[in-house]
Amino acid sequence: MSHKSASETSALVPEHSHSHVIDYNAIDHQRYAPMQHMRNSAAGLFTRSWKGYVELVKSFRFVSALPAIVVAILIAHLPAPEGLSSGGMRLLGVFGGVIMGLLTADYDMSVIMAVALLVLTLTKSFMCTTSDGHHVECSKCNTMYQGDLGHWHEYRCDPIGGSFDVAISGFSNKVSWLVFSAFHIGKAVEKTGFGRRISLMLVGAMGRSAIGIGYAVCLAELVLAPFIPSNTARGGGIVYPIVESVIASLGIEPRVGEDPIGGFLSIVASNANLVSSSLFVTGMAGNPIVASKAASIFGIEFGFTEWILGASIPSLLLLFLLPPLMYVLLRPKINSANLSREIRRQRYALGSASRSEYKLCATLALCLVLWIGTPYFGIDATVVAYMAIVILTLLDVLTWHDVVNNYKAWDTFFWLASFIVLAEQLTALGVTDWIGNSLSRSLRDATPMTSTVSLSLAYFLSMYLFSSISSHVVAFAGPFFAAGHVLGCPPKLLAILIAVFSSLAGTLTPFSTGTVAIYASQGYISQPRWFMLGLLFAIVIVVVNLTAGMLWWKIIGWY
């Protein structure tokens, strides 16, 4: 029998050794400590390895698209409900994947749409046209069917080729070309400095008070909105630099905390951008989608003239109310002397008007006359916009190099044309009607007017779910129109409410569109307060449209 040394024994026996009580916890600790250390090391190694794996996964851009892919596959493979075919479910799945991709995927919108069109083409999920003029799902091409008299016939069409014809049909759509042309007109406004000159003139003429500067910003947005269909390009590229110059001239630095005058000009400018976008079909890139869906679902004419006629009273009233409302809420003070010096300095640096600006002004005046007089001249709004590009190029206001390198125009042309195809096919395959019927069930016992107001308010508030106005329009405009059609809502009334609310809903969050995000990120207003101011202005928007707007639409006979 072996004996332990005194030192060993003392390590195992408690301090009061005379009690002859052995501390078995101490024994276990010594015995198992190395094993515990190994387990901790292994766990640490596993944790570090897992974190490294996660970082490795995150480094692959494709991973960001996985939620969209999963959503598309899950929806596409669900059993088709009554009223939808398997092709309709595949289209609905891709549509759901597109919406999820816009929210989560680290890819440009055009890339997402290109993938969507390719998938729908290869899976033959479009509606093809047969050689004898019938419309059939492309997956049924070259199959036999029994006619009314019992005879068998064949759907003669090319499933893949026909699908691709549908996929690229949006690039010949007039709405796509209207927006594409308007982008180039906006490029001319930017290149010649005409937009900046107008903005500086307005601020210089009205900048003797905070409210005056606010109205100047509103007017600048209003003047530029018909010609620059990217509200981000208009607000962020032309008006924002001027607003920042005004703020800087007053001795205010961005990102140094909240400031009343900086916050006032930021919130006014961002909302003026949204209100001006609601006034014209060319004011925001998503507006033509709304107009197209309204026309296709309700069978009404809802072009440039109808849009501006319907939106004019409520939108102009909102522009009128915006500066004094924000002034009351923020109480800004300005030094008009410093501001006047800054405006004079910028106008001097800009110089006198160039020949290109005069040529541009003449072209824009011609466009306005032809657009407003479309019913009299018989020239479509898209043709007018296209003609403007040709005239500006021939007059050397724009060069062909400017046209080719206008990235934003080509990018918007691609994704807008793709969205139009998707929207048209959702209608052709019955998906839009099915979604509309599903939405309308909750309002089946309501009157048409109650349904109209309820649908428009639900559409407005649903903007909280989106970080992009265009994504919101693409996802919900068609289904809400379809629901209104089922419920018997007055077509033009619901159309104009959805139309103006598409842009105006951007006031609800500080990240709804590029321009709003630019102003909100300057730090003159805290994020919680921006949300609160947006909610207050949203209430004003709803009240104005459901009172003054409803009265105006009643006067012009829209319900």
Image (tube, grey):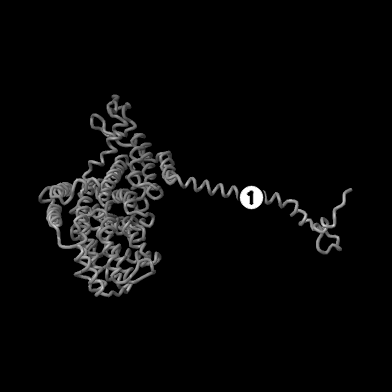
- Which residue: 42% across, 45% down? 61
Q: Amino acid at mark 1?
A: Ser
Q: Total marks drawn?
A: 1
446 or 27: nearer the viewer: 27
Residue 395 position within the rendered picture, expressed as x and y whole percent measured from the top left: 13, 50
Task: Say which residue label 1 marks.
Answer: 41
Can residue 532 be spotted in the picture? no
93 or 47: nearer the viewer: 47
389 or 330: nearer the viewer: 389
Residue 554 position within the rendered picture, expressed as x and y whole percent measured from the top left: 21, 60
Residue 513 position within the rendered picture, expressed as x and y whole percent measured from the top left: 33, 56
Vertical comparison of 473 with 535: above or below: above
Q: Is residue 268 left or right of residue 50?
A: left
- Which residue: 16% across, 52% down? 397
Residue 434 position within the rendered picture, expressed as x and y whole percent measured from the top left: 34, 44
The quadrant of the rendering that contains the C terminus is bottom left
**Tag 1's secondary structure?**
helix
Q: Is residue 243 left or right of residue 255?
A: left
Can residue 181 be spotted in the picture? yes
Which residue is outermost to the right? 1
